[in-house]
Image: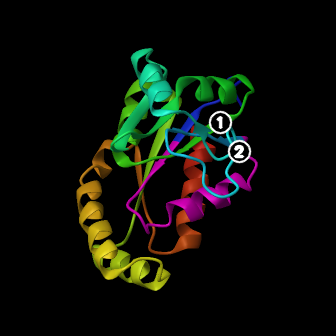
Amino acid sequence: MNKKGKLLIFSAPSGSGKSTIVQALLKKDFHLEFSISATSRAPRGEEQHGREYYFLSPDEFRQKIKEGAFLEWEEVYEDTYYGTLRSEVDRITSAGNNVVFDVDVVGGVNIKKEFNDDALSIFVQPPSIKALEERLIGRATDSADKIKQRLAKAEYELGFASQFDKVVVNDNLDEAIKETEELLTNFL
């Protein structure tokens, strides 16, 4: 492994199994560490600054945008920002670990552009929109309207797949994890 870590970018439509795949990889010996995002929303429940997120006020967030402190950021709702701090990438790679990003497709494409060959971008794709719909219904966590919204967004996000280094079709979770492990082994 290089002294300085590399970047692994995972993006996918909601319900594709991306988080399950990433969690499986974190248990393997790839020296992976999650990039902690920054947000301007208030902590929820037991969330702590520097653990789940770096919590900033909207003004602090906007100041960091002006300073160029973010690799990527988005204002999701008025005054509610999410983003990836450059300092977080430096913290992880300087320790010799590899950074794992679990980001939306636009964020994934932007991070890849910035880091080129030091980053591997993987798009986790459902076998079909119909299969994705069945998974989202099976989760039983969203209303019918929310599922419709997620499916519409998924169709949009699938249009970005070709901008990623690799596409892993998750029609069998064990196979998708195995394929992703092989991609990481070759990249690292």
Model colouring: rainbow
Looking at the rendered image, the quarter that the N terminus falls into is top right
Q: Position of residue 35 (x, y in %)?
A: 60, 39
Q: Which residues are magenta?
A: 9-31
- Kindly check if marks 2 and 1 are in contact, taking CB atoms under 8 A apart as contact: yes
Give the vertical position of 120 relative to 71 (above or below): below
Between residues 108 and 183, which one lies in front from this camera angle?
Answer: 108
> Mark 1 — residue?
98
Residue flagged by tag 2: what amino acid is it? Phe
* Image quadrant where residue 49 sits: top right
Residue at position x 71%, y 33% from top? Answer: 97
CA neighbours of label 2 inside 10 A, class few (<14), some (14 to 19), many (20+): some
- The answer, for residue 128, to whether it is visible in the render is no
Looking at the rendered image, the quarter that the C terminus falls into is top right
* In the image: residue 174, left or right of residue 91: left
Mark 2: secondary structure: loop
Q: Position of residue 73 (x, y in %)?
A: 41, 34
On residue 30, which mark appears? 2
Return the residue found at the far top: 67
Give the vertical position of 66 relative to 147 (above or below): above
Q: Position of residue 141 (x, y in %)?
A: 47, 78
